[in-house]
Amino acid sequence: MVHWDATEKQTITSFWGKVDLAADGEHSLQRLLYVYPWCRRYFHKFGDLSTISAIRKNSHVRAHGHKVLSALGDCVPHLGDIKGHLAQLSKLHCETLHVDPANFCLLGQIITIVLASRFGAAFTPEVQACFEKLVGVTAAGLSSQYH
Amino acid sequence: MVLWDAAEKKVIASVWAKVDIEADGFQALLRTLHVYPWTKRYFSHFGAMSTLKDIESNPKVRAHGRKVMAAVGDAISHMDNIKGHLSQLSQLHSDKLHVDPANFELLGNNIVIVLAVKLGNDAFTPEVQATFQKLVAVISSALTREYH
């Protein structure tokens, strides 16, 4: 079981309140698809993702980025049992979506970078450490039902 | 051999011109030491680093952050042969410093994060991010090259 101290819980909860799920989610997914192009394989049904311009204009990317960041936000009220909370989503990613779990870490890293660029100096080393722990625990939770 | 197109070279030159070697190098190293605490093992001769406040007020961390960032700048001046340029430093990290090369990526990620914090969303575009992630990956790879 992952332990979160009071400071970590407070940092994550208060910081998450300032995240723009639509804009930050869109930017995170855009950057994932651009910086790690093999990820596009999972989104053939989104249409044209061949250039950064195409990715930026793609409405499916915007919608899906929002969905993914909302799902990360849903983990915040369940910090005490992220693994349990994500069990079904983990099974889905393994059995239906067939996603290589290494990509969860890449997306976590990208979300960290997007938040750093949006919040600037407010993204202090303490905030960064809390967020890297959150995305690490989330990636582990999403991988937990893989077989 | 790593190829850099004209757009990538331009992005690196223009972003690097805004980098403050001392302040940004210090931030990158302090975030690495704080977020990945095992990296403190390599710097036990730096003195107190058990809390973030200790790390922030440690002059050796500041000096070493500057040194590391200056080395990244030197690698940029040799972009067409980063592997050759870093071969001695790679041997040093393997033979004398005994650094686990996985840590080069962690420091590289923190350099990218420090640039994101500094430039903000508008200037730190996906293209800038991709170019710098390529740069830190090439540097990591070159620093690992002479390990045996």
Image: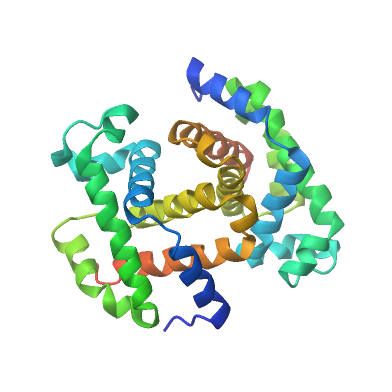
| Residue B114 against residue B54 in the figure, above or below | below
In the shown orientation, is residue A19 left or right of residue A102? Answer: right
Q: Identify the residue at horizontal 37%, vertical 67% (top origin).
A: B139
Q: How many marks?
A: 0
Left or right of B19? Residue A79 is right
Query: Residue at image x 25%, y 56%?
Result: B67
Image location of residue A91, percent across then percent down: 71, 41
Is residue A83 visible in this depiction of the protein?
A: yes
From the viewer's perspective, is residue B134 above or below residue A14? Answer: below
Foreground pick, B79 / A7 = B79
In this rendering, does residue B142 appear at all?
no
The C terminus of chain B, quarter of image: bottom left
- Where on the picture, by quarter, is residue B42? top left
Determine which quarter of the picture holds residue B76: bottom left
Give how far across and how far down residue B113 sits, in percent: 49, 49
Residue at horizontal 30 percent and vertical 71 percent from the top: B145
Locate residue A101, reporting x and y percent: 60, 50
Q: Residue B6, position in %: x, y?
A: 54, 82
Scheme of colours in the image: rainbow
Instruction: State the quadrant of the N terminus of chain B.
Output: bottom left
Corner quadrant of residue B59: top left
Nearer to me, A38 or A114: A114
- Furthest-top residue in this view: A6
User: Where B1 sits versus A75, above or below?
Assistant: below
Q: Answer with left or right where residue B13 lies relative to residue B90.
A: right
Judge left or right: residue A51 versus residue A38.
right
Whether A61 is drawn above or below B84: the answer is: above
